[in-house]
Amino acid sequence: MSGYGVKKCVTCDKNSSPPVVMTIAGSDSGGGAGIQADIKTITCLGAFGTSVIAALTAQNGAEVRGVFGIPADFISCQLATVRDGFPIKAAKTGMLATGEIIQTVCDGLKNREFPLVVDPVCVSQSGYKLLQDEALDALRGRLIAKAYLLTPNLPEAELLSGISINSEKNVEDAIKALLDLGAGAVLIKGGHFESQASSVHMTDWLGLPGQRPIPLSHPRVDTGNNHGTGCTLSAAIATFLALGCELEEAVIKAQAFLNRALRESFNPGIGAGPPNFLAGAGHKRPF
């Protein structure tokens, strides 16, 4: 996939600075998802993370007790300040709770020259609604069209496309519908597919314009520590794009990072624990 100067993955020169990745998302006070997961992922993969905080949440691994939206004008200020101060190589969005926030972010991303990964966060792992109903139109009408890659899970893909997904044909139809909304590419994540529940592998589907969806399989990891997996995957994809990978390669490398992180996951508190970000990058656990 062409665009934004993304080239084949290369090893960074030892004398050069790490590429800068920007995350625009909500803060997770539990540390396993949102801005915190994004920054940990970006750092573990060797890039430099910057952030635009779009919302504050009071949550842990078991529940979300509250969400506080950051005023739109301050989100705009954060976004402009980061863009003015850093040579952004890639960016991602996560939780953008309201239509006003989405519109503000879209306005702040005008004239960009870097790829944007859009993770359309709608509901938390614990079932808390993170996207207001009125925000759906802004997501479908503006933000998706800015996505170099859109990364919905199954429920999000169904919500955004209006298509019930029960087969590979449904996957193809949903991807086409999302591409028609302006996304450059679509990755439908396979974690919620009932047909994969007993399989030893999971399959994510990468859709590119004019092509049949590409199945990208990886080993299933049976763990309850799955808090922040979507954030982690999208942040990893954005980071590999910033490091110079082509899109499919970035997705495959991000899958491998998340898979390793889940295999070595642990639970630091109550509820679902997060991926082990350091293990995902190949670091041994110090405990």
Image (cartoon, rainbow, N blue to C red):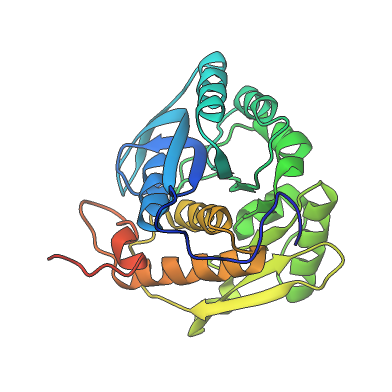
Residue at position x 45%, y 59% from top? 13
Say if residue 1 shows up in the picture: yes
Locate residue 124, reporting x and y percent. Answer: 46, 46
Measured along the vertical axis of the image, is residue 169 above or below residue 20?
Answer: below
Q: Is residue 65 left or right of residue 147?
A: left
**What count of labels does the image hold?**
0
Measured along the vertical axis of the image, is residue 115 above or below residue 287?
Answer: above
Say if residue 126 shows up in the picture: no
Q: Quadrant of the N terminus?
A: bottom right
Q: Is residue 31 left or right of residue 219?
A: left
Q: Quadrant of the C terminus?
A: bottom left
Residue that protrudes farthest toward the bottom in the picture: 200
Q: Is residue 108 left or right of residue 130?
A: right
Q: Quadrant of residue 169?
A: bottom right
Locate residue 235, reporting x and y percent. Answer: 49, 52
112 and 272: which one is in front?
Answer: 112
Locate residue 46, reporting x and y percent. Answer: 40, 55
Measured along the vertical axis of the image, is residue 232 above or below residue 263?
Answer: above
Residue at position x 60%, y 25% from top? 101
Locate residue 7, reporting x and y percent. Answer: 66, 61
178 and 11: which one is in front?
Answer: 11
Q: Quadrant of residue 273?
A: bottom left
Residue that protrudes farthest toward the left in the picture: 287
Residue at position x 58%, y 48% from top? 119
Q: Is residue 265 left or right of residue 287?
A: right
